[in-house]
Image (cartoon, rainbow, N blue to C red):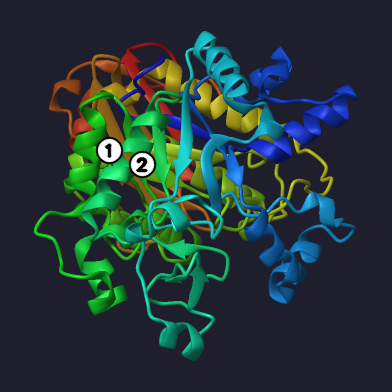
């Protein structure tokens, strides 16, 4: 596995510090990355997971932590999540990076190397973070290379201390995106500065020595259009070349198979794919599954397959509320079946499989105890394993049409898709509603005619015999309960 992830990887995000703390509590001794027992690695790498994203391994900023401790709004969010929280359990933000060195409290570089070896033995890759937009105020670059930053004047610092800070006599802008006030604990890098682009590629090359891919935080902030809109004249002249093509090409000269994942919003996924990213967050699908109609989901899935293969599907991550909090159990399972069988990368969040409901601020080392839902975990592990074993995602995917009849429009709540390739033919149908739904799913395979076929449920083993002429003439009839699903393999004929 080391060096390259699958074409459509299944990724499991793990909050590294919280996870290690809980391992230490169970074992009664310190647990750095090199001390993780076999069963703990097995828990986060169930069958069907291709990569683990160890979120938050880099050295955090003492100065950023001090700012967080003084921030009343942040403190309120911390105690809301963990009411009995102690100050020593506030580590600071993993996105306020002092240095891109593995934190000594996690076991340092040797600990990360041991972790990567354990994952590699399981055939699982490793993803790490990179934060391209900003660094901590005590990052050495702030005094060694002030030319890497968006800079202001003494007058700016006096006029707007919330937007600027002075480091080693240089006035530097605090980090921000164009729609929010500045973040108080970080300093803004200048995406237009040639030397910063070179330095970014250097850091990413070193990170690439330690892992198989990087998840780039808020990657869209570094595109020329967004950066110019955010910083205007303060950034200097706009370069002809975009930030990401220049940086990614520089990294891939040393790590040609390194995977780049963009946290992306504002419908800039296609732009970032063209600029070198292998995958971009599919926030639009997340929003539509949670808050919009089945038809809105279908419309989103009409995009070209090659574009969809480079999206990251998810139902939660550390920036979003827990799925068990936002969705009823039956809807959560239906949504999980949907995203697990779509093209693209799939992102799962540690604790999602067991029904955790508390969204933990990333500053914290401890989360509240919550009862584990064993049935939910078994469902997710069965789903991931079934999709992986089937090999369906090695084929060609397409969205399928669903028909109904004049006095029953419930087929509009069905979202159906199919895979066809070396592993065979597969159909997924999901009822994205809280009422029963019936319909005919149009199958795009005329070669099914004149033969009897067996449809086997990959999640429950249920078998159905169906006439090929009926399948090609009318389609596959489905009758699903509220939030019901089918994941079916189509094989040679048999009995009901």
- Report the label total: 2
Residue 324 screen position, x and y as percent: 66, 51
Residue 431 screen position, x and y as percent: 46, 49
Residue 290 screen position, x and y as percent: 50, 60
For image coordinates 36% across by 41% down, the residue present is 261
Quarter residue 353 falls in: top right
User: In the displayed structure, would residue 244 be above or below residue 260?
Assistant: below
- Give neighbour class at mark 2: few <14, some 14-19, many 20+ (Cα, 10 Å): many
Looking at the rendered structure, the secondary structure element under dot 1 is: loop
Which residue, given by chain and number where applicable, does mark 2 sit on? 261
User: Which one is in front, 45 or 442?
Assistant: 45
User: In the displayed structure, would residue 318 be above or below residue 177?
Assistant: above
Q: Is there CB contact under 8 Å for labels 1 and 2? A: yes
Whether residue 405 can be seen here: no
For image coordinates 30% across by 26% down, the residue present is 7
The image's mark for residue 278 is: 1
User: In the displayed structure, would residue 19 be above or below residue 405?
Assistant: above
User: Which one is in front, 272 or 111?
Assistant: 111
Q: Farthest residue to the top: give it.
A: 121
Q: Farthest residue to the bottom: give it.
A: 159
Quarter residue 380 falls in: top right
Quarter residue 242 falls in: bottom left
User: Which one is in front, 315 or 157?
Assistant: 157
User: In the displayed structure, would residue 340 be above or below residue 381?
Assistant: below
For image coordinates 67% across by 26% down, the residue present is 107
Q: CA distance from mark 1 to mark 2?
A: 6 Å
């Amino acid at each position: 596995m080391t060096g390259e992830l699958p074409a459509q990887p299944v990724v499991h995000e793990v909050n590294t510090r919280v996870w290690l703390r809980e391992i230490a509590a169970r074992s009664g001794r310190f647990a750095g990355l090199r001390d993780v027992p076999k069963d703990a690695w097995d828990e986060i790498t169930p069958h069907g997971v291709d990569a683990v994203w160890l979120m938050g391994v880099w050295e955090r900023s003492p100065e950023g932590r001090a700012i967080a401790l003084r921030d009343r709004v942040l403190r309120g969010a911390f105690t809301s999540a963990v009411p009995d929280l102690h100050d020593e359990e506030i580590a600071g933000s993993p996105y306020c990076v002092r240095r891109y060195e593995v934190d000594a409290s996690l076991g340092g570089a040797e600990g990360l190397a041991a972790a990567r070896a354990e994952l590699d033995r399981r055939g699982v890759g490793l993803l790490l973070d990179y934060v391209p937009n900003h660094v901590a105020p005590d990052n050495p670059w702030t005094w060694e290379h002030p030319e890497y930053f968006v800079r202001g004047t003494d007058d700016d610092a006096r006029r707007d201390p919330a937007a600027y800070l002075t480091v080693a006599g240089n006035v530097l802008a605090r980090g921000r995106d164009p729609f929010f006030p500045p973040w108080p604990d970080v300093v803004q890098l200048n995406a237009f500065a040639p030397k910063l682009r070179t330095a970014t590629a250097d850091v990413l090359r070193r990170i690439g020595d330690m892992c198989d891919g990087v998840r780039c935080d808020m990657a869209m902030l570094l595109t020329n259009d967004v950066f110019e809109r955010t910083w205007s004249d303060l950034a200097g002249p706009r370069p002809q070349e975009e930030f990401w093509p220049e940086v990614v090409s520089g990294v891939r000269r040393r790590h040609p198979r390194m995977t780049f994942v963009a946290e992306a919003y504002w419908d800039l996924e296609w732009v970032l794919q063209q600029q070198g990213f292998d995958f971009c967050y599919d926030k639009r699908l997340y929003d539509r599954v949670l808050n919009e109609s089945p038809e809105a989901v279908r419309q989103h899935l009409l995009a070209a397959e090659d574009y969809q293969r480079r999206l990251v599907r998810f139902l939660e991550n550390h920036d979003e509320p827990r799925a068990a909090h936002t969705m009823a159990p039956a809807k959560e399972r239906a949504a999980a079946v949907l995203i697990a069988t779509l093209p693209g990368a799939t992102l799962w969040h540690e604790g999602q499989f067991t029904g955790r409901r508390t969204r933990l601020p990333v500053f914290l080392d401890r989360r509240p105890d919550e009862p584990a839902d064993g049935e939910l975990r078994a469902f997710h592990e069965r789903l991931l394993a079934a999709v992986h074993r089937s090999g369906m995602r090695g084929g060609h995917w397409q969205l399928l049409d669903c028909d109904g009849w004049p006095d029953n429009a419930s087929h509009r709540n069905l979202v159906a898709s199919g895979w066809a390739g070396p592993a065979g033919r597969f159909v997924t149908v999901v009822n994205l509603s809280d009422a029963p739904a019936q319909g005919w799913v149009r199958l795009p395979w005329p070669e099914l005619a004149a033969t009897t076929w067996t449809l086997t449920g990959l999640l429950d083993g249920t078998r159905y015999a169906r006439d090929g002429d009926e399948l090609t003439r009318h389609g596959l009839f489905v009758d699903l309960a509220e939030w019901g699903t089918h994941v079916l393999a189509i094989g040679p004929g048999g009995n009901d």
